[in-house]
Image (tube, helix red, strand yellow):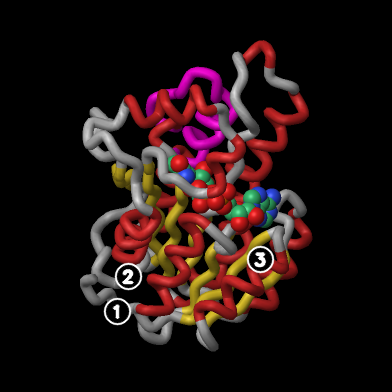
């Protein structure tokens, strides 16, 4: 493992109780950062934080509730790094067969919550002249996966938020970037049909799933001072699937 220097940094990782977020939180702690996990599953977040040791803590946050994000931001202290990682798939169905309530829920968690979290934490980063924000989008946001219009649209929106905010903050010391992973075998697979999982694997030229630790390595670099001249950018991690 390469050494990434996050010493003295305070990071918030949303959805850090499991999966990619937990791998990111672990990599951050190993890199010297203090990490606060925000997750709606408070018990799982506590267990995750305990497994990471004293540099990690947890807070139960339902990210579809603006007030909970705002309260968590106030309680967190001077946050240097925000990883908008929490996400849901909303299942798989043809666009015209999706329930509007599920469409809205996916947009709420995957797109609106990152916006609210940025809104809460960016002013402090600007005031301190330093910040790193990494939004965990998806290759689906670039390509549009069939039977996942809600998910794909939410991730496309997150990519556009990254680009707009990155330009607004260029020159402040606060950099905003996104990653677009292909499929990783995490508990999120329970929210998808086997047919959809098979479709995603078939699209990956490396013919395997992404490992959460591989995503964490890219996020750790983007969250560090070494990432200094990239903002509003979208970083591929799709095993060769992406063509742009
Ligand atoms: N695993 C993949 O195949 C894959 C591929 C591309 C992108 N991604 C993205 O990576 C991110 C992490 O995915 P993962 O595979 O680790 O998922 P996961 O389901 O394993 O973990 C997601 C975490 O987010 C939390 N969460 C979900 N909704 C929340 C809410 N409303 N409020 C607070 N916490 C909430 C869950 O409790 C869970 O701990 C997601 O944004 C996902 O869309 C995943």
Do callouts 1 and 2 mark residues in contact (Cβ within 8 Å)? yes
Q: Earlier in the sequence, mark 2 or mark 3?
A: 3
Mark number for residue 240?
A: none
Q: Which residue is mark 1?
A: 5
**10 Å neighbourhood of mark 1: few (<14), some, or many (≥20)?**
some
Name the residue at 60% across, 79% down: 57
Q: Is residue 74 visible?
A: yes
**The residue tagged with tag 3: helix, strand or loop?**
helix
Q: Is residue 137 visible?
A: no
- In percent of width and height, residue 36 lies at 57, 74
- In percent of width and height, residue 227 lies at 27, 64
**Viewer-side label of 2, 3:** 3
Q: In the picture provided, is 100 more to the left or to the right than 241?
A: right
Indicate if the residue with disc 3 has its beta carbon within 8 Å of ligand 1: yes
Task: Reply yes or no: does residue 2 show up in magenta.
Answer: no
- In percent of width and height, residue 46 lies at 66, 74
Q: In the picture provided, is 8 more to the left or to the right than 59?
A: left
Q: Which residue is mark 2?
A: 224
Q: Which residue is mark 3?
A: 44
Q: Indicate whether 117 appears above or below 159.
A: below
**Viewer-side label of 1, 3:** 3
Range shown magenta: 141-159
Q: Earlier in the sequence, mark 1 or mark 2?
A: 1
- In percent of width and height, residue 189 lies at 53, 40
């Amino acid at each position: 493992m390469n050494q990434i220097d996050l010493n003295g940094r305070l990071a918030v990782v949303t959805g850090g109780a499991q999966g990619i977020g937990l791998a990111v939180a672990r990599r951050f702690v190993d890199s010297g950062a203090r990490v606060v996990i925000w997750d709606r599953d408070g018990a799982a977040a506590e267990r995750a934080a305990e497994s990471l040791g004293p540099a990690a803590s947890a807070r139960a946050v339902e990210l579809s509730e603006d007030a909970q994000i705002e309260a968590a931001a106030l309680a967190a202290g001077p946050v240097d790094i925000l990883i908008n990682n929490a996400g849901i798939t909303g299942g798989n169905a043809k666009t015209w067969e999706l329930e509007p309530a599920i469409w809205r829920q996916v947009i709420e968690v995957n797109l609106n919550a990152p916006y609210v979290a940025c809104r809460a934490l960016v002013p402090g980063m600007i005031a301190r002249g330093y910040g790193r924000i990494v939004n965990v989008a998806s290759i689906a946001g670039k390509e549009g996966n069939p039977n996942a219009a809600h998910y794909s649209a939410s991730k496309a929106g997150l990519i556009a938020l990254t680009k707009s905010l990155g330009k607004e903050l260029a020159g402040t010391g606060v950099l905003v970037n996104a990653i677009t992973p292909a499929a990783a075998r995490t508990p999120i697979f329970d929210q998808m049909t086997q047919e959809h999982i098979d479709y995603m694997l078939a699209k990956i030229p490396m013919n395997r799933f992404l490992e959460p630790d591989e995503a964490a390595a890219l996020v750790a670099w983007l969250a560090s001072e070494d990432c200094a001249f990239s903002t509003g950018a979208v970083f591929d991690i799709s095993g060769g699937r992406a063509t742009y």
